[in-house]
Image: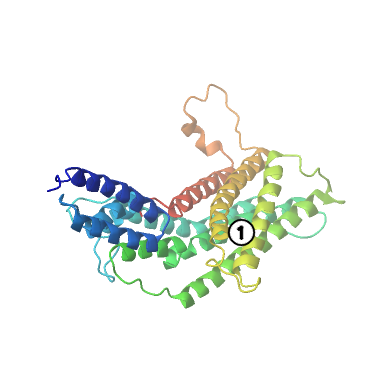
Amino acid sequence: SPEPNHSRPRSAATCYFVLRSSLVNSLNSSNFHFTKNLTSHISSLARRSTVPLPSSTYIMQQTEAETTPEWLQTAKTGYGTNEDEDFSSPNDEGGNQSSLPFLQRAQSASIIISILLSPVAIILVSIWASSLGGVSWAEGEAKRVFNWHPVLMVSAYAIMNVGALIFRVSGTSAYQASVRSARNTLSSTPTASSDSKKRGIVKFFHASIWSLSFIFGIVAMLAVIKSHNDPISGYIANLYSFHSWVGVLVLSLYTLQFLVGILAFGGLLSGRSRRSNPALMEIHKYTGTYIHILVTVTILLGIQEKEGFVQCAYEVDSADLVPLTNYGKIPYACKISHGLGLVILVMGLCTSFGLARFPVL
């Protein structure tokens, strides 16, 4: 009789690991047809082999765990599968406290604070302009004409701030939709169809708000040009400060961002949408966030420059070691502008945090 083939179990085990490695690669490349055939070969090999091999289902589970990103695995194992369940469940299935609810609450609080500070900024800049003589558009009143610049710029920033957060507030942002989709996919729960009508309404308000901000910005720039070229009040040089250079750059980026949004996602180019060009949408969201940061910095630079003309410094007879004791000597207009600057700074920080996309979410 022929000698028993002692090499068969070893060969089968070797083939199993080779095929399993190929299965991982096939999952990474989304070649599911090849994966299906490969698992059939593994099952056939397991039936012929004397060495017990793992089932194809087990292999699929293992390879899925290896190829699934860690944050998606967390989403799969850390939260319930009920479609109506709040995604910010405080505990995962293992009873461990998750960082997701804290981040969601912190972002929600930041968004609320930023939106509430928007009208506060408009009120403060209006009081500041009033303390500097008010506003006008008549020739011979260059200083009052210039006051339109901070009023309109801060107002544009405040409403732009609301426009940037409106998708998060309404729960219709693409990021929030992707989080829900990832959870439902991993938990084998059917994903509910998105409310396209609601998102369309929110997108309309988003575009309208940014359009209004764009108009405010253009008129604010015209106010500077008019006040600096007034033949009665006297001519003043243009674009001599760092604030003006940064301002022109930021306004140019804002205009480009605005045009891309209107043309690419406003339905003006053959009805294109974020789904038809996801790469451009990611760029649009990325640049939008940083334009908001740049606008924040530009406004702070403008406040600092204007305070230099107002002359916020006060005279002292000795070393000013305790400045708080001389707080009353600071001009009223400077106190208002200091408060305005702090409000703008907090708004920028809260909005940036509110728009952040954390991997755990």
Q: Residue at x 38, y 64 (%)?
A: 33
Name the residue beneath numbered marker 1.
156
Image location (x, y in percent) of residue 248: 71, 48
Of 315 and 358, the residue lying toward us: 358
Question: Regarding mark 1 in the picture, which secondary structure is present there?
Answer: helix
Relative to 246, 178 lies left or right: left
Which residue is most to the front? 1
Which residue is most to the top? 318
Q: Residues within 10 Å of mark 1 (few under 14, many from 20)?
A: many
Q: Where is 147 relative to 205, above or below?
A: above
Image location (x, y in percent) of residue 175: 44, 60
Residue 73 visible? The answer is yes
Relative to 296, 189 lies left or right: left
Q: How is the image coloured?
A: rainbow
Q: Residue at x 59, y 47 (%)?
A: 294
Q: Which amino acid type is marked by label 1?
A: Ala
Q: In which quadrant will I find the C terminus?
A: bottom left
Q: How many marks?
A: 1
Q: Residue at x 47, y 59 (%)?
A: 115
Relative to 226, 319 lies left or right: left
Of 174 and 126, the residue lying toward us: 174
Image location (x, y in percent) of residue 296: 57, 48
Which residue is most to the right? 231
Which residue is most to the bottom? 197
Of 207 and 94, the residue lying toward us: 94
Residue 68 visible? The answer is no
Q: Residue at x 44, y 62 (%)?
A: 168
Image location (x, y in percent) of residue 44: 24, 59
Of 290 and 301, the residue lying toward us: 290
